[in-house]
Image (cartoon, rainbow, N blue to C red):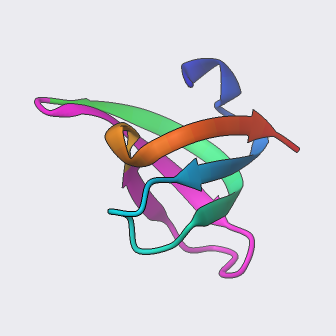
Amino acid sequence: MKALVGKRVVLDLTPAADTATARGKLLGTIDAADGLVLIIEPDEAPATRRSIHSHHVKNARPI
């Protein structure tokens, strides 16, 4: 997933996440004690940030 930093992505999320997908620019990652955290700028809310734990991501692909 770190290879996608700086790119626009679609994240397919698990049912435990609050939405089925997340779409936006992957701004960076944080190595947390419980795994990798992805920071995205969502397409639907420019200039905001959303954090998503990698264990909620089923698939990540560039768009």
Residue sitting at 55 percent across and 74 percent down?
48
Residue sitting at 56 percent across and 67 percent down?
20
Return the x and y of residue 57 as percentages of the image width and height: 48, 43
Return the x and y of residue 54 as percentages of the image width and height: 39, 38
Return the x and y of residue 53 as percentages of the image width and height: 34, 46
Quarter occupied by residue 16? bottom left
> Could you say which is closer to the camera, residue 15 or residue 19?
15
In the rendered view, tell whether residue 49 sits above or below residue 56.
Answer: below
Residue found at the very far bottom of the displayed protein: 45
> Could you say which is closer to the camera, residue 34 or residue 46?
34
Residue 47 shows in this picture? yes
**Location of the C terminus (image quadrant):** top right
Per the image, is 41 magenta?
Answer: yes
> Could you say which is closer to the camera, residue 28 or residue 36?
36
Q: Which residues are magenta?
A: 33-52
Residue found at the very far top of the displayed protein: 3
**Location of the N terminus (image quadrant):** top right
In the rendered view, tell whether residue 52 sits above or below residue 49.
Answer: above
Residue 7 shows in this picture? no
In the rendered view, tell whether residue 9 sits above or below residue 13.
Answer: above
Return the x and y of residue 26 as percentages of the image width and height: 63, 44
Residue sitting at 38 percent across and 64 percent down?
17
> Could you say which is closer to the camera, residue 58 or residue 43?
58
Quarter occupied by residue 32? top left
Per the image, is 51 magenta?
Answer: yes
Residue found at the very far left of the displayed protein: 33
In the rendered view, tell whether residue 3 sits above or below residue 53.
Answer: above
Residue sitting at 62 percent across and 62 percent down?
22
